[in-house]
Amino acid sequence: MKRPKAKAESLSGAVLKKALGDPRKDPELQIGRLLNAASLASDKLRRNPKNDQARRDYNFAIGRIFEVLHESGLEPWKMPLKCPGKDGQWTFVVKSDGDPTHDPSLFRILPADRFEFSGSLVKQRTVKQGIGAPMVASSKPGLDFTKKDRFIMGQNVYYGLTVLIRFDGQRCTAVSYDPLQVENVQLSGHSFPLAADFTAPLGLALAELKPRRTELERMFKPDQYAGTSRLARLQPYEAHKIPILCIHGLGDSQATWAPMIETLRGDPVIRQHYQFWFYTYPTGFPYPLMAADLRKELDDMAARYPGHKKFVAIGHSMGGMIARELITDSGMKLWNAYFDVPPDQLNVSPQARQILEGTLIFNHRSDISRVIFASASLGGSDVAVGFLGRLGKKIIGSSTAILGDMDDTMKAVTSAKPAKTGEPILAMPNSLDALDPDNRFLTTINNIPPTPGIPYHSIIADRGKGGNLDKTKPVSTDGLVPYWSSHIDGAQSELIVPSGHWSNQNPQAIAEVRRILLAHIGRKAKPVAPSAPAPQNLNTNELQLPAGAPRILD
């Protein structure tokens, strides 16, 4: 990754050049020289806090110090390092906040400017200019953070940090801040915006975890992934922030939300008031089963984090169908569409009865305060009954693993009364069955109005190939879901964006989500300044990294 040369070289930049080299050779000496440069830049900022070159030099030096630590294996969080300096020996320590889940020894701490990201999910680097070196803290292999908190994003975690070094004589202390929690910091007697890279943690997670690799398997072979659905937070929990619940659609994973999250995190008001959560699930299972599972997850989340703020849910595609259930009181209407007897008279096992009741009888969630539908297939899709849909139904596995014993499950399902067509249920349904516009569950729930008092919004995509939109006879489509399926009466707003089916990644749709989120807290959306396009703005202008930056593809 090349850096443009500046016309004039700063003094701290000259010191930095001397320090750069192989981070594995004489690491203490190299760190000492980098501390010389950071100290010099810090002194310059004390005299002139508007000295942007000194700020860049300071940030760059810190990034290189942590690069040396990573490459050399030195651990100043366990024991102070003694490093030779210009005016004597530096004593260098890394301060921890005492939280065992933040123990630096559990993480790789990597300078964010070491990476370039590109791909369909990382199109723009969202950064915040300021003081400090943005880092990615990723858990070391072999650790499972979900044992400490089951709502942590996964066994492997990726957080964004920003590191500052404070100097007190020859003692220097590295302190880390969460840029999602802290906006401004004090350094050298002045207040500065805290620098941040909101793309790097997501980009590295996408590159290393590769969540998209199993998306098709989780659709076509859902039984193999039974029990893997989960509600998880993307960032450290903060009780005062409103959780945004992102629910992906058929054949997708949580990765589909990366462009939206990267963009929204660039807004300081969003950062101040919201936190991001995911619900991820094997998409081959029928969505009513996954909606029932999500309700259980939300109950568990409330027990783990009592008093949390009410969720704003965003559902894309089939995720919108799940979100629809969160604002619906079914009463007995769904149950009666399938059975002529009440639950206690159904001749099935207690386990099967519990599953059927949980799927067909439910109330709206009092912990949901607003819903945003994005290309939601609320009315199903003709694709599900076309050639591809018929083929898919043959390929997608059954739901027996999530429902329990096969014989008991089949008895419960086939005991349902025939549909209006007179056809009985002969096989276990899958996700495409639930997308059939004539599906019994779908037609019934769409005749149940959403519960009053919970506002909802619709974002609908039009790829521009299905004819002009006519509200009296809508024929537009995003390629998979037509307008008539995504439209829902009673929406507080409906926006049609020029996009294919993945409207949750469309810039206009993301801007609409931002508008809705700001309105939710009584704020009015203002135009957003373009994010810095190149990560080198985080560093010194006249220096190059000691080696080519890795290119990361999502």
Image (cartoon, helix red, strand yellow):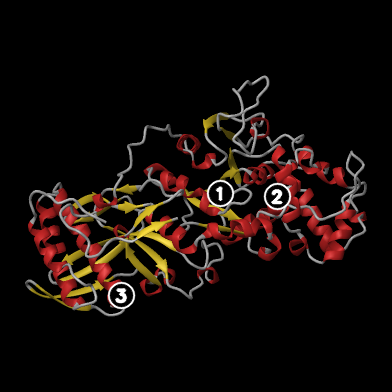
Nearest to the eye among marks 3 and 2: give it.
Answer: 2
Q: Position of residue 56 (x, y in %)?
A: 19, 54
Q: Residue 221 is drawn in which quadrant?
A: bottom right
Q: Which quadrant holds the C terminus?
A: bottom left
Q: Is residue 435 left or right of residue 520?
A: right
Mark 1: give few (<14), some (14-19) or many (20+) Cα within 10 Å: many
Most foreground residue, 63 or 365:
63
Q: Position of residue 188 (x, y in %)?
A: 16, 57
Q: Position of residue 294 (x, y in %)?
A: 65, 54
Q: Is residue 497 above or below residue 387?
A: above
Separation (CA) of disc 3 from disc 2: 47 Å
Q: Is residue 112 left or right of residue 487?
A: left
Q: Earlier in the sequence, mark 1 or mark 3?
A: 3
**Residue at position x 51%, y 53% from top?**
255
Q: Is residue 247 above or below residue 448?
A: below
Label 1: element kind:
strand
Most foreground residue, 221 or 345:
221
Q: Which residue is mark 1?
A: 245
Q: Is residue 273 left or right of residue 309?
A: left
Q: Amino acid at mark 2?
A: Tyr
The answer to whether one can see residue 76 in this image is no
Q: Which mark is residue 287?
A: 2
Most foreground residue, 137 or 473:
473
Q: Is residue 283 above or below residue 462?
A: below
Q: Which residue is mark 3?
A: 77
Separation (CA) of disc 1 from disc 2: 16 Å
Q: Which quadrant holds the N terminus?
A: bottom left
Q: Amino acid at mark 1?
A: Leu
Q: Residue 44 is drawn in which quadrant?
A: bottom left
